Each structure stands twice: as C-alpha cells, then as structure tokens.
Amino acid sequence: MIELTVGTISFKETEVHVAYHIAGQLKEIESGTPIKATYSFPLKQDYTWASMVALGAFLPYLVSRDSQVRVTLPIEPTPWLQEYWQNYLTAMFAQKSFSVEWNFTAQYHTAETEVLFAAGSANRIGLFYGGGVESTFALSTFYHKNPLLISVNGKDWMNADKEKSPIKYNLISELMQKYQLSMQEVSMNVRSLLKDTNAVFNRFVTGNLFYFLSAPIADKFGIGTLYLSTELEYALSEEEHDQSIHPQFVNNIFVKNPSWPLFMSIYMGFPKVSMFAKLAQTDFIKYIYSCFNNSSKRWCGACSKCFRISEFCDRIHLDRSVIGMQEGITGRRENTPSTRYSWKYMDKIYGRKYVREWVLLGKHAIKKFKQKILHLEN
Ligand SMILES: [Zn+2]
C-alpha cells in the first residue's frame, strides 16, 4: 500500500503551492518540495482544483507502482472527484486490478473548494502550442478564430524548458506578433518532483498536467475546449506509449461536469509528413521548431526529430533554409513505436527509395565512426 496525502494548499497571487506526502517512500518522488504552478494572472482559490492537480501529478503513477493506494485530501468529499478517478484509472489500467481508498479531512470547506469554473458555456478555442509540426499545422487551419495558445512549461520537461530553448520561444513570439495571437503560459515543477523517465512521465502524467493546469486559463479566458493536435502516426502507436496524451486516451481526462472544459485530440487523421507538406504551402512553415535537444542551434542535427524533419524536406522538395535548417542533416530510418509509422507513411505517399536509404545509412555510419576516432584522439 502506498499513501498519498495532500496537505496545505496555498494561493499566493499568481502562484499555487500544494504540499503532499507519500508514505511508503518511493525514491522516484521528491519529498519536502510542494507542487508549484505559476500563472500570469491571480488565481481563484479553488482547493478542489488544486487537489486535482496533485492527483493528476501522482495518482496514476502510484497505481502503476502498487495496486493499493490510499489518498487523503484536505477538502470535503466531492462525489464527482472519486467517480472521475475511478473511471480514469479503470481506462488506464484495464488489465490490472487496483483499489483506491479515499479520505477527506475537510481542512477546506466546500463553499470555498469549488468556486472556479464557468468554462462550460464558453466557446473560445484553447490550443496547446509548442511550435512543432502538429500544433503549428492546427494553428494554420484556425488562426482566424483567435485561439488562445497555451504552453505548459517546466524545468527539465521535454523540450519545454524555457531556459534551455530561447530559440523556440523567440520563434513563437514572432509568430504571435505577426498573426496577433496571444499565449498563456503555466510554469510548473512537477517534472522534477517525479524523477522517472520521460516515457513514464508521458505515460502517466503529461496529459493530466496539460488539462488540470490549463483549467484556470480556460476559466479566465472563456475557453470551452482545449485542443491537442496529434498526427496519425501517434494515434497508431501502441496505446501505452505516451498513454496520457494518446488520442485514444485523452477523452478520459476531461471532467464530465458542465463547468469544466473539454479536452480534445484533433487532426490525427493526418500523417505528419502531410501536415508538413500543407504547412509548406503557408507562411507558418517558417516558424517550425522541432528539435529534442534545445541546443544553441535551432536544429541540433543529432536527434530523431531533426532527422525526420530533414527527410520531410527532401520528400516534399522544400529548401531547408526556409525552416532555418543547416545543410548536412540527413534522415535516418527509425523504428520506435510512433516514429516507424512516419517512415511508412512517407514511403506510402512518396515511394520508398532503397538506394538512397543505404547511402544515407552509410553516411551516418561514417559520421559516427569519425566522431569515435575524434573522441579517442581527445
Ligand atoms: Zn535536434
């Protein structure tokens, strides 16, 4: 049995702190540092919402580690909350039996625990935006509707660590100025509180953070639906791969209560290369940022995203300089759960070129060999 206790919740203007304690110490979860999330506007003091953020950060992960979890929350019992998590966990752990025991200490009273939301009847679009192919493609199709772009940032979190990737954020601000769009950012520290791999974090946490951390933004800016754009290859990947943001799972995340926003996965009928080809017919292509490494270069040339985007350029005959990519980055066939479909669809649409593939494979091998020699000499 693992126990999660959510303790003091404090609202400090634009910031919320949620203290928690895990009994049955898991070395992967930091103890002593509260969850922190920072917004650009003062927050309403909704303790139920803050409790949901903490549950989104840890509960699915804890159930993955132990089939019995006891949860203690500082609010009064809220029937929809228990029902929500029962449905969520049943969808996520279809093959596993588990039980969650709920306790409520009522440190905060209901009158002050559910004051937040009026997003249900709102109709503005919220779009999770990271500058990559999928979100930029989505934006290119409905920018005229004045969607609010939403960015969830955090230290060490994938390529959304603002300090590491100024190039990405500069491109985003250029794009926003040009199309007179606005963005709301949330900064949070959850990635450094749960010290497991990115794969584990995306499987159990990422989607929840997108949704729950965006809820106050939806309330403040009148957003009824939060859109997450994903490509066909992602939808085709095994469901447990990045499960919390998988198109087949996202609809388990939104709270089925009229005052909470919807969370929808969109455009997963488009192979990524087709999104890229359509973007290349628009001005939006110039703003693409899609590198894992967040180095001092816009394209590091050494990560799978750089390889794939370079290959897309070749397939659709796009001059790399349009996206600020240097010469010399070449594609390399990949075989991970979601990337292998990217190559399949490129072949399906543009034909497979075996000779070229072997030549590129040879080039990569020589490059690696040279790097090794250089490394030895140093
Ligand atoms: Zn890269």
Image (spheres, helix red, strand yellow):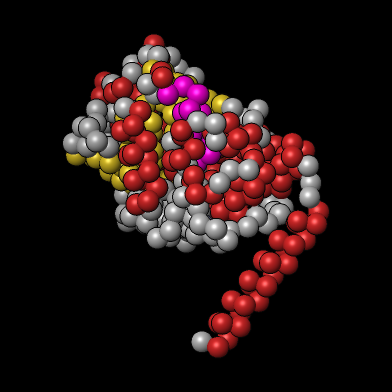
Q: For this rendering, which residue is in front, 27 or 227?
A: 227
Q: Main secondary structure of the magenta part?
A: helix
Q: For this rendering, which residue is in front, 259 or 233?
A: 233
Q: Which residues are magenta?
A: 131-143
From the viewer's perspective, tell me whether residue 301 is left or right of residue 345: left
Identity of the residue drawn at 61% across and 83% down: 373
From the viewer's perspective, tell me whether residue 281 is left or right of residue 95: left
In reply to whether residue 132 is colored magenta, the answer given is: yes
Residue 327, visible in the rendered structure: yes
In reply to whether residue 270 is colored magenta, the answer given is: no
Most distant residue in the right direction? 354
Q: Quadrant of residue 238?
A: top right
From the viewer's perspective, tell me whether residue 218 is left or right of residue 326: left
Vertical relation: 306 (above or below) 111: below
Q: Position of residue 348 (x, y in %)?
A: 77, 38
Most distant residue in the top direction? 121
Residue 84, visible in the rendered structure: no
Q: For this rendering, which residue is in front, 294 or 40?
A: 294
Vertical relation: 330 (above or below) 217: below
Q: Position of residue 128 (x, y in %)?
A: 44, 33
Q: Position of residue 168 (x, y in %)?
A: 40, 47
Vertical relation: 200 (above or below) 364: above
Q: Position of residue 226 (x, y in %)?
A: 45, 25
Identity of the residue drawn at 27% across and 37% down: 39
